[in-house]
Amino acid sequence: MELKMNIAELQAFLDDAFPQVAGDFEFVSIAPKEVVMALSASEKHLRPGGTVSGPSMFALADVSAYFAILSMIGPVGLAVTTNCAIDFMRKPGPGRLLCRMQLLKLGRVLAVCEGRLFSEGTEDVPVARASLTYSIPPSDKST
Amino acid sequence: MELKMNIAELQAFLDDAFPQVAGDFEFVSIAPKEVVMALSASEKHLRPGGTVSGPSMFALADVSAYFAILSMIGPVGLAVTTNCAIDFMRKPGPGRLLCRMQLLKLGRVLAVCEGRLFSEGTEDVPVARASLTYSIPPSDKST
Amino acid sequence: MELKMNIAELQAFLDDAFPQVAGDFEFVSIAPKEVVMALSASEKHLRPGGTVSGPSMFALADVSAYFAILSMIGPVGLAVTTNCAIDFMRKPGPGRLLCRMQLLKLGRVLAVCEGRLFSEGTEDVPVARASLTYSIPPSDKST
Amino acid sequence: MELKMNIAELQAFLDDAFPQVAGDFEFVSIAPKEVVMALSASEKHLRPGGTVSGPSMFALADVSAYFAILSMIGPVGLAVTTNCAIDFMRKPGPGRLLCRMQLLKLGRVLAVCEGRLFSEGTEDVPVARASLTYSIPPSDKST
């Protein structure tokens, strides 16, 4: 399978479709069935002590999975998260928080992704892992 | 087991310990091993179409579990989420989004909570369900 | 919604479709969107000390969810588990292990169930909780 | 970190501690923080059509995680599964079912593992993915 969108197209889609969070996330790299995104953490993403909050880590995993799928199927706005299982393992250190998300299955109605969150430069010591299922809308009304 | 904190004490702890999100959540009711909280949804919590975002639902489940535990053990700031499994089942309708969270296990090192999110007035048709594990810090250094 | 199968019909379907495990599980009660099943634990389900094994608890949750769905949609053999999140909270005590499983969502392509496992007589102290997603096959080729 | 047990020691521990399932699983390879195990599927592990059952896949993931941990901490019999999230993505094909399980975190009280199940020879198309948390018993009574 080949990518149907490049980083510029994915970024444009993000800016357009999710204006509330567009500035929070950026694309680091994409490849077939794999996307790396980063959280541009600001005050609202942090907890006391400067640690990135759980909901912000969930959001990074969720948006990474969404774009791992979209990069393969094209700009379909209606894919929705149906399930997420996330393990928080360590406190993120200083520096950017990244997520490498892989697309494990792209079925007719479901897509399954799995990824790890890590502070930049320490990918071998992930701070969290997450698996997500997305429901894919029918591609047209005849399906 | 009896409650160690009432709503006023829980709200004060929330306001003090989590100033970034304090205005986002409010307590609806508490009872031994059960808390009901509400999301005061504002623009930042919404997605296109006015639907509450997944990360906001995760945040509501997470904070509800945290306070279901704290209400039973007292104001211990160091409990941390280690795992969450969440299923998004329906789009929330208009109106306040609530979460009824139950404490299923309060062990020496782990607490397990389970709850459902629903739009006010339609608790029988939950929009999401979530289960969370928290790691409880040792109560003193001798443990 | 009403039940489409009664206990005798569910038991007959179980015996017929899953002969390998048919003797392992029995129906305790059914109601719309809720089934209670029991594990008839034998040597193969136990771990050292006589505790029911994790895989046996998973199996009980899985079969309970399957029949919570089938009782509502009729004897469709092709529903398959796509996701399960399970928390093991306590060691089961002696006596029968039961699972009360609820159907939280029955959609066009996905069904979501949530339930708790407990030793007979102590439902208020569950030994495990589980949530499962099933993929529902299209009811006919035109869908 | 280095391995504290080799395959022969792990196999001996499995045979001794879990006689009911000892013949069901075998070690394929071990390395620091990673174990590959295989299910020796027999009739009891199969569903109609010859597919490996969900509970058998759960069991393979669970035992693989257990030994990924034990290989690093030594033969401690009391580690217990506290959580598992598993996604079933495809039906296993014919041939041996394997699980490559990685130890992502080995903490004082919790260990987190993540792995994928696949039919021998097609590791790039996993049939399932699983993440598991184990609770680690204190290493001695003074802790």
Image (cartoon, coloured by chain):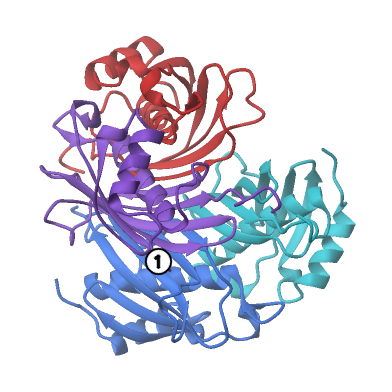
Chain colours: A blue, B cyan, C red, D purple
Q: Is residue D28 visible?
A: yes
Q: Is residue C96 above or below residue B113?
A: above
Residue D21 % position (x, y): 32, 32
Residue C111 picture quarter? top left
Does D21 sit left or right of B118 as displayed? left
Residue C7 picture quarter? top left
How many marks are shown on the rendered structure? 1
Residue in front for this viewpoint, A121 or B25: A121
Does A16 sit left or right of A44 as displayed? left
The residue shown at (13%, 31%) is D49
Residue D111 % position (x, y): 50, 57
**Mark 1 belongs to which subunit?**
D
Residue in front for this viewpoint, A91 or D23: D23
Q: Is residue B47 visible?
A: no
The residue shown at (65%, 30%) is C125
Q: Is residue A54 above or below residue B95?
A: below
Residue A60 % position (x, y): 47, 74
Q: Is residue C7 above or below residue C61?
A: above
Q: Name, please, the residue furthest toward the top.
A: C8
What amino acid is at disc 1?
A: Glu
Residue in front for this viewpoint, D28 or B62: D28
For disc 1, the marked residue is D2
